[in-house]
Image (spheres, rainbow, N blue to C red):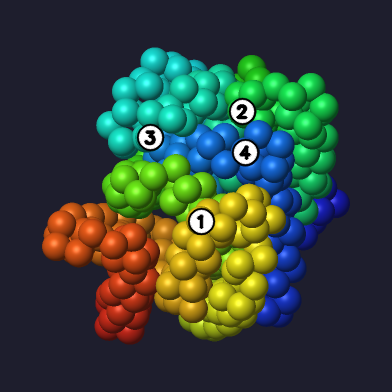
Amino acid sequence: MKTAARNSEHANLMTEGSIPKKIVSFAIPLFLGNLFQQLYNTADSLIVGNFLGSDALAAVSSSSPLIFLMVGFFNGLSLGAGVVIAHYYGAEKDSLVSRAVHTTVSVGLICGVLLTFIGLVFAPQMLLLMGTPESILPQSVSYFKVYFMGSLAFVMYNVCVGVLQSVGDSRHPLYYLIVSSLVNIVLDLFFVGVLGLGVWSAAFATIISQFVSAILSLWHLLRASGSYRLELRRLRIHRRMLYAIAQNGLPAGFQNSIIALANVVVQSNINAFGAAAVAGCGAYSKIEGFAFLPITSFALSMSTFVSQNLGAKRFDRVKSGTRFGILCSISLAELIGLSIFLLAPVLIAAFNDAPEVVSYGTDQARTIALFYCMLAFSHCAAGIMRGAGKAAVPMLVMLVCWCLIRVSYITLAVHFLPDIHVVFWAYPLTWSLSSIVFLCYMRYGKWMKGAA
């Protein structure tokens, strides 16, 4: 017989009850959490752009793809760990859940230290390789270095949140993210707006807020009563569990890095058009982040939902849930895309109202925004494949479509037609291509076979 604690722990199980209700109730806190994450990322750019000018905004923007390149790999490992934990949790194998949690946290601690070293040592060289304009290079380097001083915090936050989400708890990560978002915005205004410090202070505000959210998340796991409770004395790496996590996490990590690497190439081409282009496109990237909110929310929901239900051998729920999740994701993403298309000039001007900056940002928005439905479908399909234990599939699709084809297209097209709009079109073209590939695989591939 299950104890009261056990019943309480399993309140978040996605293997029972209404499918739409379970997915939406899990996705809404994720959506709100991503919203606050995007708001405080956007606050950095808004405050820097308005108080320190377009060059400072460009410095922050030029670092973003490189930051995602380095952070994305470790976030992918967290996603892989979450799939493993969700699978065991759905199958009610408590001892394996505990082993997976302690292995994941141990690996996260090591990765956080490693990422700090890489970011601090190689920052200038990587920014130079991207062709960052000389006028903004010193500010970009200072922002990048300070940002990576907080590597341990944002790696551990993502690890802890991954654990909580894998067991169906998306509410507590939301609460902690709201707190850290408010801390970040207040510190941004104080450091940049009141004290008039440089662009590095925006990164400093970010790492302080990341430490706040990481500590809150760790504290929650230490006080949890379920099988996913964290006990410091049990922190160790279990080899078999590490293999299972790596099997799911490495493809997701490589996928994130592949996408980020391709985006670094895109950013390098944008850099060639000058600081105004970098600032305008950087402002757009912050706005575009809002379109990612339903996309990432439902993609993560799909991973957890599919993994738990396959662990419980509920194949009927998997099929119904994937259809519902994809439909919700693409509908919301396209609605946001239409709004950005119509409001682009006003939104870009909020960051910096220089006419050239607004022009570049608006052009990019109106080239890309109406294709968000394709981006949503690709991410949801990737989330489903990860939840089914087929993490290599999205990795290969992204490698071909979002890296090889995207980079090849830009390299050839810009050579013959040196127009920034050619660079902008790289995204909708490759999103559409990956969607076609995923649709064919989901329709004809036996992706649930052997997943349970």
From mark 3 to mark 4, how far is it between C-alphas?
A: 16 Å
From mark 4 to mark 2, how far is it between C-alphas?
A: 10 Å
Task: Please tell me in which quadrant of the rendered image residue 198 appears.
Answer: top right
Label number found at residue 356: 1
Confirm or deny contact between disc 2 and disc 3 (CB under 8 A). Answer: no
Residue at image mark 3: 133
Residue closest to the eye, 325 or 363:
363
Confirm or deny contact between disc 2 and disc 1 (CB under 8 A). Answer: no
Label number found at residue 53: 4
Residue 239 appears in the rendering: no
Residue at image mark 2: 199
Q: Residue at x 73, y 76 (%)?
A: 21
> Residue 308: x percent and y percent?
56, 62
Confirm or deny contact between disc 4 and disc 2 (CB under 8 A). Answer: no
Does residue 170 sit above or below 250 in this rendering?
below
Does label 2 or label 3 sit earlier along the sequence? 3
**Which type of secondary structure does the marked residue at label 4 adopt?**
loop
**Which type of secondary structure does the marked residue at label 3 adopt?**
loop
